[in-house]
Amino acid sequence: MELRNKYQIPNNAIITIAGTVGVGKSTMTSSLANALGFRTSFEKVDTNPYLDKFYDDFKRWSFHLQIYFLAERFKEQKRIFEYGGGFIQDRSIYEDTGIFAKMHYEKGNMSKVDYETYKNLFDAMIMTPYFPHPDLLIYLEGSIEDILERIQKRGRPMEQSTPVEYWIEMHKRYESWINSFNACPVLRINIRDYDLMKEETSIEPIIERIGYFLKQTQLLKK
């Protein structure tokens, strides 16, 4: 909270952390929330009933998985709205539609009818008053080599058994997505520029950048 005041970050701000698997979104979410006195909104992975099935059979379970994620994220958006902001969010709803659902459709893992149904549902959700758009999206980026190393260190069985080609393609799709993303302001941070696991104080320079970035975006709106 002291750092939030120091760098004049609004107490109702909504900051979303985005980036491909392995970049450390959850660690960044927790560190920022603790430093700023904000609530967290985490992606529910361990309780997801489709995730293991999906990694075994992309084609059969991709639509189910994406609908599950969409529903869970919308519930989180409604919770953020009801609290009035002051949240750090682990992964954005925009990634679901702009990267994952699109990829599965293009690769033939999701039918055209299912993909159109998914997109129509997403479009309806973001038009409701319960969908607060982020004040800032922090994009954690890194080389594919650094990301693959982190995935190996994390050691989740379902990720370990996934072909490396999948992660390479995901990395490319993320880079393409963020280069055209315009739903809210974006701050890019390279994962080599900090190490929150070894040095907790490395969060302050990031918060300083966030404060400066938010001030600049507010000035541009005036």
Image (cartoon, rainbow, N blue to C red):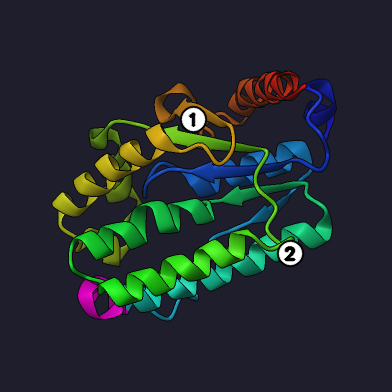
- Left or right of 171 in this view: 21: right
147 sits left or right of 218 in the view: left
Label 1 – label 2 distance at C-alpha: 30 Å
Residue 209 x/y as whole percent: 63, 21
Residue at x-position 26% and y-position 64%: 104
Query: Pointer 1: what residue?
Result: 195
Q: In this view, does 146 lie above or below 124?
A: above
**Is 219 situated above or below 106?**
above
Task: From the viewer's side, name the closer residue of 82 and 195.
Answer: 82
Residue drawn where x is 74% and y is 60% of the image: 129
Query: The disc labelled 2 sits on which kind of residue?
Result: Arg
Residue named by callout 2: 79
Who is closer to the viewer here, 67 or 44?
67
Horizontally, residue 180 falls left or right of residue 205, namely: left
Q: Where is residue 47 in the image (x, y as percent from the top left)?
A: 50, 76
Task: For residue 78, say whether it is visible.
Answer: yes
- Range of magenta residues: 53-61
Q: Which quadrant of the figure contains the N terminus?
A: top right
Between disc 1 and disc 2, the foreground one is 2
Q: Residue at x 49, y 52 (%)?
A: 94
Badge 1 amino acid: Asp
Q: In this view, does 110 lie above or below 106?
A: below
